Amino acid sequence: MPVATYVRDHVGRLYRVGETDVEVSGRSRRVVLWAAWAAMLAAGIGQYGFGVLIPQLRDRWSVPELFWALALWTVCQAGTAFPAAWLRQQNRLTATGAMWIGAILCGTGLLTLGQGQLVGYAVLGGIGAGLVYATCLGTVVRWYPERVTRKVAFVSAAFAYGSVPFVIAAGILFSDVNGFLTQAAIAITVIVAVAGAVLKDPPEHWWPPHVQPREWALDRARVPNRAALKEFRPEEAMRCGTFWWLYGGIAFAAAVSLYDLAYLPLFVGDKVLGAIALATLAAATGTGRVLVGWISDRIGRRKALVWTLATGGVAQFVLLYSQNTAGLLIGATLAGLGTGCCYSLLVGVTREYFGETNGAQNFGVLYTAKAAGALLAAVVLASQGPAFAFIAAGVLGLAGAVLTRHLSQPGRPRL
């Protein structure tokens, strides 16, 4: 039976080495990765699938009411990340327990929407999706400490493109919204619950035996994405200016993304074309997260984040002034590649700026910027006409790019 040993690198980080993934958990970490991917594939329907239902739900509620419901769902989803991370850090909530609770809440949220309860959808569905999101990312980070950004991008991408079949089916094939939501709720509950039974955390500080941790740490010191100079607790990170530059950029990006999600089908007018445009946006968001994660390994997280937010801002003007279907789909693709991709970079940026010991909690606090962005979108964008709203969204996206240009590792000179 292999015996675990602990080593430290040149900055004092601790590694538990000598054990394979199968030896510590009884299963390959690839199984955990694919289980997290499948769960995220299902959980994202509550966000990306809601937009395509808005034209069909207008006979029950007004557009502002529907937008506020989506904003509240986003607030609950983003606001769950920090409490979930804290409970898991304190060993008061297991990965499986969190996923099972999330499965029930996600399914119940869609069922209540079918029964005419917007608040039930927003609160229950949002909290459930937040539990699934935080648990899946947190578990993957623990199993792939040497490839965090790429694996997080792979899993979080499913949260976006997993809704594409739902969007197409809801927008084109099905007219009975209630029956369709019931079927979707059952499917989501089963998928997330089964995936939750597979998820299990490795021992703390576990490190894959085929990678030499000290050499890996020295290599990281020479690449654009360097390790943090200090392990920050959440309250320490919040005293850094970098934290708030990053928070503002994510909040602006979230506002733009939420506006596109809710209003793109309405802006298009045609039901089928609206569904296709929204499916294009979701697909571009998902695949773009994987692409941006790969690019950020080479040019640096900060540069990748600036360029994605700028792309999302420019996309709003393309959408507003597009004269044909091709222009609309190009705008939707750029919007997905832009503001929707920032979340896959956020995990890596957080760990590389504020350390890895409290990485999940620091990410949870920063992820609440998505909730702030949802409220900003509901107040500033939802009450305006499409011309003003798309221009304002474009300005917000570009402003987010400007804010993130100021990012620098706390304690390390910019040059």
Image: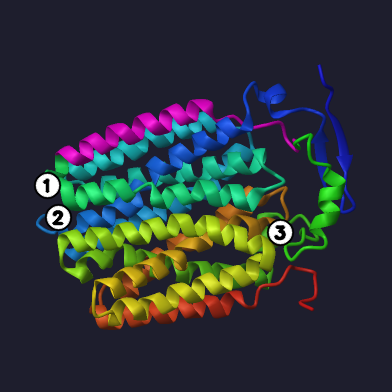
Residue at x 59%, y 34% (from the top left corner)? 30
- The x, y position of residue 35, in whole percent, is 50, 34
Residue 188 is one of the magenta-drawn residues: yes
Q: Position of residue 302 (x, y in %)?
A: 64, 69
Q: Residue at x 59, y 58 (%)?
A: 293
SS majority, magenta: helix
Q: Which residues are magenta?
A: 179-206
Which residue does the numbered mark 1 point to in the structure image?
175
Name the side, left or right, on which 71 lies relative to 197.
left
For mark 2, what is the residue?
56
Label 3 vs label 2: CA separation?
Answer: 44 Å
Pointer 3: what residue? 352
Check if residue 173 falls in the magenta segment.
no
Q: How many marks?
A: 3
Tell me whether the residue at label 1 lies in contact with that at label 2, contact meaning CB atoms closer than 8 angstroms: yes
Element class at badge 2? helix
